[in-house]
Amino acid sequence: MSYPPPIYDRATGEVSAWLLAADSPPDVVYPNGNRVRYLATGESTGRTYGLYHWDFAGPRSGPDAHFHKTLTESFYVLGGEVSIYDGKRWNTTRPGDFVHVPAGGLHGFRNEAGAASMLLHFAPGAPREAYFEGLARAAAGETMTDAERDEFMRHHDNHWVED
């Protein structure tokens, strides 16, 4: 297997790294206390990937079984326990556990045992920020008709199934 074609074509490097400090505020705070930090958005990575730090506050929450047609999703558990659905069953994952879900792979995640933290990685870098923000508005009481919710989910490549 070889390396992919170059995506940088200059003869010398450039100053382009960025730092997001650990104490930076969350980008989204849900009414239940869950917090999301945008570590690297699709826009900031040239659409190659998106990386998000998700903190569950404690009340049971998280998406049920679904799949994506346009992206892969990976989970790396940092703290607590996160239940992750692998298409067959819900698995209790703990710090250091990693789950990768190819496009089309059935999956879901939720906390069921209190506070937890994980990294979410999407490739390619889809604009998931609008999805997270829309869910937060809905959780805060903004209403959507069934048709609007269906369109919101379709637009954000979430296809729900029964687990």
Image: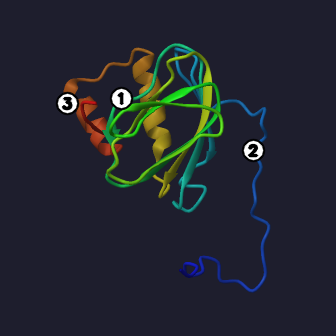
Q: Nearer the viewer, mark 3 or mark 1?
A: 1
Q: Residue at x 43, y 53 (%)?
A: 72
Q: Residue at x 28, y 42 (%)?
A: 154
Instruction: Name the one closer to the observer, 5 or 104.
Output: 104
* N-term-proximal mark, 3 vs 1: 1
Image vertical order of residue 12 relative to residue 68, above or below: below
Q: CA distance from mark 3 to mark 1?
A: 19 Å
Task: Write down the residue under mark 3.
Answer: 147
> Left or right: 21 with respect to 154?
right
Q: Secondary structure at mark 1?
A: loop
Q: Identity of the amino acid at label 2?
A: Leu
Instruction: Name the one closer to the observer, 93 or 44.
Output: 93
Q: Secondary structure at mark 3?
A: helix
Q: Nearer the viewer, mark 2 or mark 1?
A: 1
**Residue at the far left in the pictured view:** 147
Task: Write down the residue under mark 2.
Answer: 20
Q: Identity of the amino acid at label 3?
A: Ala
